[in-house]
Image (tube, rainbow, N blue to C red):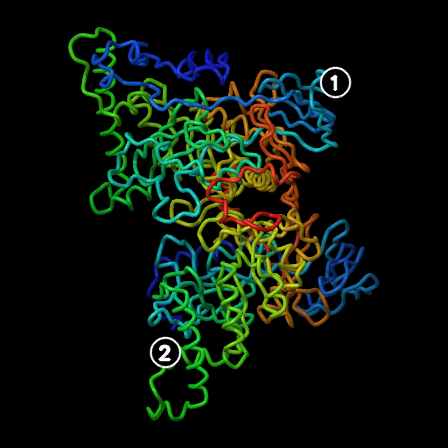
Amino acid sequence: MQNGKREAGSGKRARRRGMALALTLFVVPAVRAQTVAITGGKVYPVSGPAIENGTVLVRDGKIVAVGANVAVPNGATRIDATGKWVTPGLINALTGLGVAEVNAVPSTVDRTARGDSGVAASFPVWEGINPASTLFAPARNEGVTSVGVIPTGGLIAGQAAVIDLVPGTLTDMINKAPIAMVAQFGDARDGGSTARGEQFARLKELLEDARAYSRRRAEFERAQTRPFAARRADLEALVPVVEGRLPLLLNVDQASDIEAVLRLARETNVKVIVAGGAESWEVADKLAAANVPVIVGAMINIPQSFSTLGSRQETPALLQRAGVKMVLIGTGSGEEGFNVRNLKYDAGVAVAYGLKWDDALRAITLTPAEVLGVANRVGSLQPGRDANIVVWSGDPFEFATRVEHVLIRGREVVQPSRQDELMQRYKTYPPAYRKP
Amino acid sequence: MGGGVAALAACAPAKSTAAAQPRPATAPAPARDTTRLPPGAGAVSAPNADPFPSTYVVPASRATLIRNVTVLTAAGPTIRGGSVLLRDGKIAAVGTSVTAPGDAEIIDGQGKYLTPGIIDDHSHMGVYAAPGGDALSDGNELTNPVTANVWAEHSVCPQDPQFPRALASGVTTAQILPGSGNLIGGRSVVLKLVPSASVQGMKFPGAKYGLKMACGENPKRVYANRGPSTRMGNVAGYRAAWIQAEAYRRRWDKWNADHQGDPPQRDPGLETLAEVLRGNILVHNHCYRADEMMQMIDIAKEFGYKIRSFHHGVEAYKIADRLAKEGISASLWSDWGGFKMEAMDGVRANLAMVSAAGARAIVHSDDPSGMQRLNQDAAKAMAAGEQIGIHTTEDQAIKWLTINPAWALGLDDRIGSIEVGKNADVVLWSADPFSVYARVDRVWLDGAAAYDRANPASWWRTDFELGNVPLPAGGK
């Protein structure tokens, strides 16, 4: 499938491959040594308290030791992090990286399935990811090492994945897929339903039919069941959801809509994640009681629609205080594309609006890993985890801070982005147009 | 800058606004004041430079001394341990040893930062008011590619909840522009961010109008079916409009000089364009690509007008030396880009590179959310410049947010810096404004307390918000 697609878009893809080749010339000599020791830094494992003058030891792409008194084996490649801050790689939970290159150019956007009457449960968004996307480098160069790739549109948008931003093939990049079924509830009118109650009933019917289907597959194949509310492939895709193995991630903002989602979760016994959550702070206690995680940003405070009248920048802090599992995403202007990197600034702004610094770091590392079901591999610095590590010149949330090293699975991955090349080309006047 | 504007600096904003209007450089005075014409003799047909006059009045305020602050003046080096005295709406004194009059309120800044009020020269507040939807979508008159006849102020809803949020983020002045769907989108309006039942009550007295023009993908996409559908069609459209405008300007200038016969037939669109040709309306040109900016510069030369600022200019860094040479400012984001073809080459050091080349760099928003963090956008651009060896000091970067946009609006003699005689628009920050953790603590606008973070009961709450938007302390 993927080969066919590549051929179909041959011109553009070939050009991208050319660019990728040019970029390889820049690659900083990869720290491919078996063992890497990052020493002397202020280490934030996130899974535990910060360690002054700590060492992170990496072997074969995995973290093997983290602490103040870690012996560095002979022959290890050393990264001196004295005076630097060391954190897990950041995780941006909601992006279109790899499936949306230039939003206004439809041929480069593979985020929205046609579906069937607003239902695209069987849509595996990751199958459209283009590993040659120019948008990965800006994100990983600024410390984002994993992202959620999320489908959009419809009542049920499709299935999301987590990818690591490691250079390579899609197979190399996939961390876990699927990680969630994505749906919308509220004033999203593109699912064919205009009334909230109808959306509720349809979601419930689809989940109930998926459950019925899962029990009666054999009869279904012999056409001995009543008609179901969705196509077979979509029902099949919903089975892990009704079996509690795959969360239903709902884009929902209005407080009353969030309460409806909590009712839906109770009535269908489905695990839900609230994303968007503009008014989630108004129902924070209920979300905490239901153990429902919320994915929010810290830069939304305008009543842009009647569903988001309660938007405020204290939302992350208020959710945290109420005991809600809270994930931060980028919500500033233009956070798509090459600004997936700006996640860290939402963390900083959340702190300015009352969130504790440690909680903010957790909300862009370990908590998204937990909520997206990949915490066994990423999101914290502890033995056994993938060596996705960032060395910063200072506080990661501050604008003046530089990224010094980014390791994904133990490999240095910083390489000039397309934007870096443009800046180098034009930083003199008249422009130098230097060959890379 | 024309002498007319310099003369205006002496006018107190509170005075009759009719007297504070920019005087056309070539059009004689009689056409401006219709009350002097005999009834029926051109009262309707003669151009009126100010048919919707500002009703803004500088509020009475107590003298205020803000002491013990780090002052980023936008006019010189940072003053540490500084004091600023606000009196009668103006900045009355700045320095390290300022004595307060006996009746002054004394504010201890506790070592925090004081900056001029932030100026956003690209906003659609009011013309795309929250909560949005078709009913409040009033920013793009997409019925003709040239709508020089429309004025943004006639779309501004003063009850837009975006206004108080911008103010609470340190923005004191904003240019409201029509959208970018048209080649020539219409007149802008410069507003002070103050509560008012009408847009006239927000209008910056004596501010020049701007003209919105737009290049590239937007107009050709909107008019794909009727044209222009190409970039060459866009250029043909601008030139056709200026050719008409030039003939119109000549007809009226002649009549104004000799008053022979009936005045020419008025045309509201050409009236606006003729005022651009006379230098009385400033051109704000939405343009992403370097090559298109260069073409727009040639068009401006062909017809004898100046482009005051290129807006968005994601490729401004490619021609920064030319912008410096032409005296054109660049109103930019730090890193918004990539969302369409003409925005693909956006780089985060754009502002720093443009600034380093000697052109006026401006941080703009085009977005009510980004508008609340223009200081952060500047900080991102400073850091990106640093990464490629361009060092920008805070004293330079503060200009991107204040005096440079003031210049783009033709208001740099009144706002945009902390200097004696300037309007007393100042912002007290909780920390260095280029830190992600900085919050706006207080805002003074024309010397009056406009925002105080510690006193939620005093916050500006629009009519729309009553009963709709929850209060921080609970309830609506």
Q: Position of residue B220 (x, y in %)?
A: 28, 43
The three-letter amino acid code for the residue at tag 1 is: Ser
Q: Quick one: which residue is furthest to the top in this view?
A: B258
Disc number for residue A420: none
Disc number for residue B97: 1
Q: Position of residue A6 (x, y in %)?
A: 38, 66
Instruction: Give whichever of B70, A132 is nearer the camera.
Output: B70
Q: Tell whether label 2 touches label 1 (CB within 8 Å).
A: no
Instruction: Give whichever of A356, A80 is nearer the camera.
Output: A356
Cα distance, mark 1 to mark 2? Answer: 76 Å
The answer to whether residue B322 is seen in the rendering is: no
In the image: residue B312, left or right of residue B420: left
- Identify the residue shown where x is 38% and y is 58%: A108
Q: Position of residue A109 (x, y in %)?
A: 39, 59
Q: Quadrant of residue B305?
A: top left
- Image position of A213 with respect to B104: above or below: below
Which element carries disc 1, helix, strand or loop?
A: loop
Q: Could you classify mark 1 by the number of other residues whose Cα lies within 10 Å: few (under 14), some (14-19), or many (20 or more)?
A: few
- Identify the residue shown where x is 60% and y is 51%: B474
Disc number for residue A230: 2
- Image position of B45 with respect to B29: above or below: below
How many labels, in total? 2
